[in-house]
Image: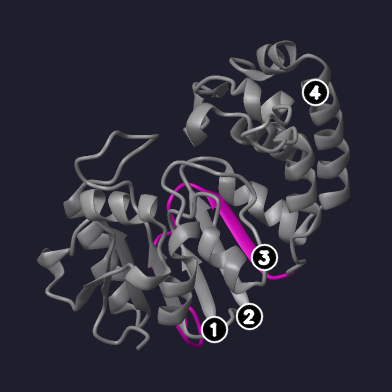
């Protein structure tokens, strides 16, 4: 099975299907919370993955799964060390600076910036430069234990552990942009997770009309298409269901799900 994620972000579904035990970094819009239900819909482990995104995340995930992870880790260890000594200086040395052309270095910088981003907000690229949403000193430095709360470790170390624990997977295609529909041999599942309609943007957006058109064109190639949105994509006339197994959610998740919603619309030939 080939899995295509045209708006992959941090590729939560792909990484879960390949055996990752934790997400690489928290990020606005991540589907890590819904990974198990999404995986149930896909139904099998991919033998090939095609990732794309308006941000550099597709390139980062490919580098970690199939590329030079050792060099990424070397750059990342330097940033984590710098960040623990002087997080403000480390942040200032990256925010607003040109995005490196070297993929390994670029990957390390994006990983560190996103792990340290305030409230998990998205790090973006604006005019070829990093645009970070603010520094979380708690993430960078940790918090000492008190009589009410346990210690919070500096999260740079946790980031190193998460990257080191990722599986290796050789067959990954990745591009900056939007993977356009094309015929792909064998069984193909396309998971489309566009920026949700009516929400605050975190980069280039797709209109609802563009999402509907993209989904129809992928379905016309014979692929099964799954779409995440905060509501059913009624324009397609496809089956849809709301995600969220009440018995498995924490109260905070129930509150968010009730107010925001999480729906999966699937093409008629989609996975059961």
- Residue 20: give its label: 3
Residue at 67% in and 19% down:
94
- Residue 84: give its label: 4
Q: Nearer the viewer, mark 3 or mark 1?
A: 3
Of mark 1 and mark 4, the one earlier in the sequence is: 1
Q: Is residue 153 magenta?
A: no
Helix, strand or loop for disc 3: loop
For residue 114, side relative to residue 127 (left or right): right
Of 160 and 256, the residue lying toward us: 256
Q: Position of residue 105 (x, y in %)?
A: 77, 34
Of mark 4 and mark 3, the one earlier in the sequence is: 3
**The image quarter in which residue 203 lies:** top left
Callout 1 touching callout 2 (CB < 8 Å): yes
Callout 1 touching callout 4 (CB < 8 Å): no
Of mark 2 and mark 4, the one earlier in the sequence is: 2
**The image quarter in which residue 238 lies:** bottom left
Of mark 1 and mark 2, the one earlier in the sequence is: 1
- Other-residue count near label 4 (Cα within 10 Å), few / some / many at <14 / 14–19 / ≥20: some
Work out how far the residue at label 3 is from the one at label 2, CA to CA, in angstroms: 15 Å
Q: Main secondary structure of the magenta part?
A: loop
Please provide the residue range marked out in magenta. 170-188
Q: Is residue 176 magenta?
A: yes
- Other-residue count near label 1 (Cα within 10 Å), few / some / many at <14 / 14–19 / ≥20: some
Helix, strand or loop for disc 2: loop
Work out how far the residue at label 3 is from the one at label 1, CA to CA, in angstroms: 18 Å
Of mark 3 and mark 1, the one earlier in the sequence is: 1
- Residue 47: give its label: 2
Work out how far the residue at label 1 is from the one at label 4, CA to CA, in angstroms: 42 Å
């Amino acid at each position: 099975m080939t899995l295509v994620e045209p708006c992959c972000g941090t590729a939560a579904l792909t990484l879960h299907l390949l055996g990752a035990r934790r997400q690489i970094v928290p990020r606005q819009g991540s589907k890590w919370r819904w990974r198990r239900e999404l995986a149930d819909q896909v139904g099998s482990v991919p033998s090939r993955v095609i990732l794309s995104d308006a941000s550099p995340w597709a390139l980062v995930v490919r580098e970690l799964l199939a590329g030079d992870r050792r060099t990424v880790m070397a750059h990342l260890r330097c940033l984590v060390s710098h960040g623990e000594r002087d997080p403000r200086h480390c942040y200032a040395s990256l925010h607003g600076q040109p995005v490196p052309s070297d993929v390994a270095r670029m990957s390390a910088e994006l990983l560190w910036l996103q792990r340290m981003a305030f409230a998990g907000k998205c790090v973006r690229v604006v005019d070829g430069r990093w645009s970070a949403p603010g520094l979380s000193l708690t993430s960078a430095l940790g918090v000492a234990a008190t009589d009410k709360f346990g210690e919070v470790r500096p999260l740079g170390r946790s980031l190193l552990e998460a990257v080191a624990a990722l599986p290796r997977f050789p067959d990954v295609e990745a591009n900056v942009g939007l993977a356009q529909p094309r015929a792909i041999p064998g069984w193909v599942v396309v998971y489309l997770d566009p920026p949700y309609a009516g929400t605050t943007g975190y980069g280039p957006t797709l209109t609802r009309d563009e999402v509907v058109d993209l989904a129809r064109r992928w379905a016309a190639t014979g692929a099964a298409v799954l779409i995440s949105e905060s509501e059913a994509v009624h324009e397609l006339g496809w089956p849809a269901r709301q995600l969220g197994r009440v018995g498995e959610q924490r109260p905070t998740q129930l509150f968010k799900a009730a107010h925001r919603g999480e729906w999966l619309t699937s093409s008629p030939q989609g996975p059961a």
